[in-house]
Amino acid sequence: MKEGFRQAMAWLHTWAGLIFGWLLFAIFLTGTLAYFKDEISHWMQPEIPARSVTSEASLTVAQNYLQQHAGGASRWLIDLPDAREPGLSVRWQQTPAKRGERGQFTEKLLDPQTGAEVQGRATTGGEFFYRFHFQLQMPYPWGRWLSTIAAMVMFVALISGIITHKKIFKDFFTFRPRKGQRSWLDGHNAVGVLVLPFHLMITYSSLVIFMSMVMPASILAAYNGDARAFYDEVFPASTAPERADKPAQLAPLAPLLEKAREQWSGGRVGRLTVNNPGDANASVVLVRDGADRVVHDFGSAVTFNGVTGQLLGTTPEQSLPRAIAGSFYGLHMGHFAGPVLRWLYFICGLAGTAMIGTGLVIWLGKRQLKHAKSAVMPFELRLVEVLNIASMSGLMVAVAAFFWANRVLPVDMAGRADWEVNSFFIVWGLSVLHAMVRRGRTAWIEQLALVALLFGAMPLLNAMTTPYHLGVTLAQGDWAMAGFDLTCLGSGVFFAWAAWKMQRSGQARIVIRQRAQPITLEREAN
Amino acid sequence: MLLSLLLCYGGFTALCLSMDRHHAELLGGKPTTRRRRLLKLGGWLLLVLSLWAAVSSTGWGLGLVEWCAVLMLSALLLVLLMPYRPRLALSIAALSLLVSPVAAFAQY
């Protein structure tokens, strides 16, 4: 009975893992990259300078700019720069939007030091990986549904994997390299078990994030089918006051930052909304930046009178259920993580990606052994092989191509941001074709070598196409830019090693086969 | 975070050495029952200490997250290092235990 249960779980693990493995690999890899979304965006828009100025100074710059260029607007939105996002973004809306609609905003990026407008090249930047991670480049809501289903399958695969794995504690520290299939299985188990807390957290929290989409029944039942009423209650929108149509001087905004900090015992302001600037009924809403705590707070804000600077109101403390949901959200996104912890998140994400990748390799390797002697592989195994190659090394080539497109495409090209994304998918598609044409191992080696070349040459490409090369960025201490280049160089070296390793083990196998053949021939002769 | 990383790595190495197979690989021979027990106890103690180090420096919320991250990283590092550079894996453990009082001193 016990063995039967374990076998059933092993079957579930094998097939759930195979069917969704390719998709999960892509979701995990892009999600891992999304931990450095701001740094990637910074590299992809190098024109936006990284400055270290106080929030007060950049807010004064923003206020001066908006008073000159958008004095009569009905609403301003100011996003303050932080250590990771260097741009000071200002947006304004000439006429108020109708209820339930998003208004038309004009957006400008400013240099927080000089107040001059900055024009970054058109790109989706790191946002592309973040969006792809849960929307899969599909129209709303299909991508979200598919990625949520994938998350559920991931959860099933994790649980069934734990049950299938017989000796978790006995094999806890075991990894035996250079033993073929054995090593792959060891590696799969090691990254699976050692990073298990991360895997469980990330998979479960992704289901919590999309819970209202997956299980809307409780909301619909409690609010008589009106989901909008639920959201109005959970996210009380800051309603804009009516215009008094009496002009009044807007108070300086910078001192309000200190007042907000007092309210939040040191919490940072992330965004400001100014309603009716220049009117007697002006109000300023300061929204807290969630990056200073693990438990994400959905829109904690304080409101001030825009003319007198008097405190008008604060949002209430969040309730326990929302704090729990917020902590899962916060843990998944990792906004709170400093540089060291962010790197640890990144490594954990890579470990998860590696776990899925090794699982796919094991599935194929086990079945290939049976057909090792025959020259042709059955169609289904060949299909899995092609998909394995394209979904793993092909995806890496596509990621590298996305970064290359950012530097190679002309800066003033029309539809530039779209073409960056297109080149990602075109290259990914080409990798499928390549995997179909070439034999399995050769395809792996060639694609890995290409990835190594593309990533390894990234600092060189950056130096040739922009003035922000490693010599400059390291000297300036612009760690996001320099870190990107260095990480690319490092991954280039790693992929070169992987390609070399693959080629060598391929040759070793041929030698063994050639040695084995005469023996069998001799036996047959006898 | 550094202190709890050092303690975690030391703790995992001790736990690893308390298992017959790994003890034979790394130090040669089977450990005596007494030694196995000591290593096991010491390993768990170090892990608990590292939790305390993480929580006491940044509070429960962030401390627990950091501790989990450090826990996973140190175990991963040890497991990947052992088959390739067993001596290095052991010397890092010894070094991290030696350095940890200094790190503790720097933290407080």
Image (cartoon, coloured by chain):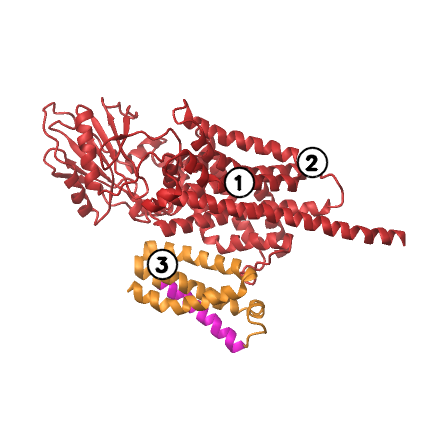
Give how far apart the Cα atoms at labels 2 and 3 are.
51 Å
Left or right of A264 on screen, residue A31 = right
The C terminus of chain A sits in image quarter: bottom right
Query: What amino acid type should be assigned to the residue bearing mark 3?
Result: Met
The shade of chain A is red
Are the residues tagged 1 and 2 within 8 Å (C-beta)? no
Say which quarter of the image contains residue A95.
top left
| Mark 3 vs mark 1: in front | 1
The verdict on a common chain for dots 3 and 1 is: no
Q: Which residue is mark 2?
A: A379
Q: Position of residue A390 (x, y in %)?
A: 58, 37
| Spot occupied by residue B70 in the image (x, y as percentages of width and height) | 41, 57
Location of residue A378 (image quadrant): top right
Assign the N terminus of chain A to one quadrant of the image.
bottom right
**Residue A163 seen in the figure:** no
Q: Main secondary structure of the magenta part?
A: helix
Cβ atoms under marks 2 and 3 closer than 8 Å:
no
Query: Looking at the image, which is closer to me, A93 or A401?
Result: A401
Is B61 positioned to the left or the right of A239 in the image?
A: right
Q: Is residue A104 above or below residue B61?
A: above
**Which residues make up the magenta segment?**
B33-52
Q: Which residue is mark 3?
A: B1
- Amino acid residing under circle 2: Phe
Give the label on residue A453, or none.
1
SS at mark 3 in the image: loop
